[in-house]
Image (cartoon, grey):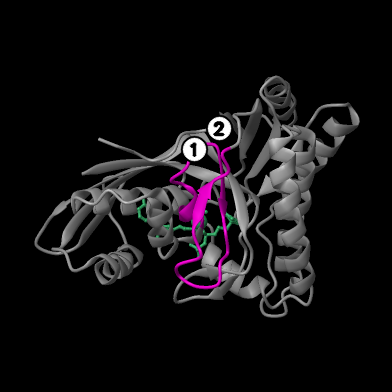
Amino acid sequence: MKATAHTNIALIKYWGKKNTELNLPTTSSLSLTLDKFYTTTSVEPANHDRFILNDQVVDATRVHRFLDILRQQLGDFTPLQVISENHVPTSAGLASSASAFAALTGAVTHELGMDLPKEELSRLARRGSGSASRSFFGNFAMWHKGIDDASSFAESLNAPELPIALVVAEVCDAPKKITSTEGMKRAITSPNYDRWLSKSANQFIDMQHAILDQDIDKIGALAEDNALGMHALNLTATRSPFTYFTDKTQLILSLIQDMRHQGILAYATIDAGPNVKIITTTQEAPKIVTILNHAIPSLKLEIAQSGPGISYD
Ligand code: ADP
Ligand code: DP6
Ligand code: CO
């Protein structure tokens, strides 16, 4: 059984766990699923659990652990061979874990003959990677932080499709040194963490309104504020402070400010990696590509738009 799930980029970020065993987050989060980046995963019965990613046998610890959680939740099943293709750089802060664990959850449940509601799938995938909970849905999705396993799930925002675009500036596609899981462990030790939590709760509500109002400028402004706040936590962590930013990340951030001064709608969001996603309109996206291309010729640039939910074949 084969499933395809697209990555999603959080406009309001998940960055901290309240319960690591159940993967309950400290905040609710809200994302846009992207058309350009996705994972396809197929599973079939085998003699023992096996994981092949992009035609290579790779470290399967996380996949094994997740399959065992699924066995616990869904009832035991035979060992599986998992074959996956990432059409997104792995571990580079472009949300490979989101599309990966959504696709894996979809493939396994379908292999078992189960046709679960997406909210239920999102609860299961959350245990593999939090951001995966949002990747079952097309367009905008929100993950309610909840208070326990049953109440921490994602759902569609049921918003109209907007002429929103994300210019993805790939600074580096190498695997990050500090995984998302490790990064957030450090970030929660920041003395500013509680302030970020309460601000995030307000931004989560404001973002829903901005989307329903189709106000792309407001969406961008809120997302940038939320993302920069997240990265400030990394820098101010009490335990092992760090940053995912590189020189190029910072240069792109300042170019975005220049573009805004010129009247271009452009805001940044950055995940657990050096790559920058620029929130803009479908109309202005090509202009931003031209400017960035001119300023940093080596930069890999792609224009992504709203993408679909999980599919099976
Ligand atoms: P990212 O920014 O790409 O989401 P994370 O640190 O959150 O990075 O997660 C990367 C990890 O996700 C990888 O080390 C691997 O364990 C897992 N992963 C990535 N792609 C796949 C895949 N297609 N199938 C299963 N697991 C995957
Ligand atoms: C910055 O979902 O990758 O992209 O649950 O530990 O696997 P784990 O973390 P992950 O973290 C994503 C962090 C983020 C923000 C977001 O996607 O909400
Ligand atoms: Co991830």
Q: Decide if residue 288 is on the left or right side of residue 182.
A: right
Foreground mark, 1 or 2, reads 1
Disc 2: CA contacts within 10 A as few (<14), some (14-19) or many (>=20): some
> Label 1, on which residue?
138
Spatial CA distance of label 1 from label 2 is 7 Å
The quarter holding residue 41 reads top left
Q: What percent of the width, then of the height, locates residue 284?
A: 73, 22
Question: Considering depth in this image, is 289 or 140 the residue closer to the camera?
Answer: 140
> What type is the residue that disc 1 sits on?
Gly
Question: Considering depth in this image, is 275 or 99 the residue closer to the camera?
Answer: 99
The quarter holding residue 209 reads top right
Q: SS at mark 2?
A: loop
Q: What percent of the width, then of the height, locates residue 238?
A: 72, 79
Ligand 1 shows up in the quarter that is bottom left
Q: What percent of the width, then of the height, locates residue 235?
A: 74, 67
> What type is the residue that disc 2 sits on?
Ser
**79 within the magenta span:** no
**139 within the magenta span:** yes
Tell which circle, 1 or 2, labels the residue nearer the N-terminal end: 1
| Quadrant the C terminus occupies | top left
The quarter holding residue 140 reads top right
Return the mark for residue 306: 2
Q: Main secondary structure of the magenta part?
A: loop
Question: Considering depth in this image, is 48 or 154 the residue closer to the camera?
Answer: 154
Q: Which residues are magenta?
A: 131-158
Q: Decide if residue 70 is on the left or right side of residue 100.
A: left
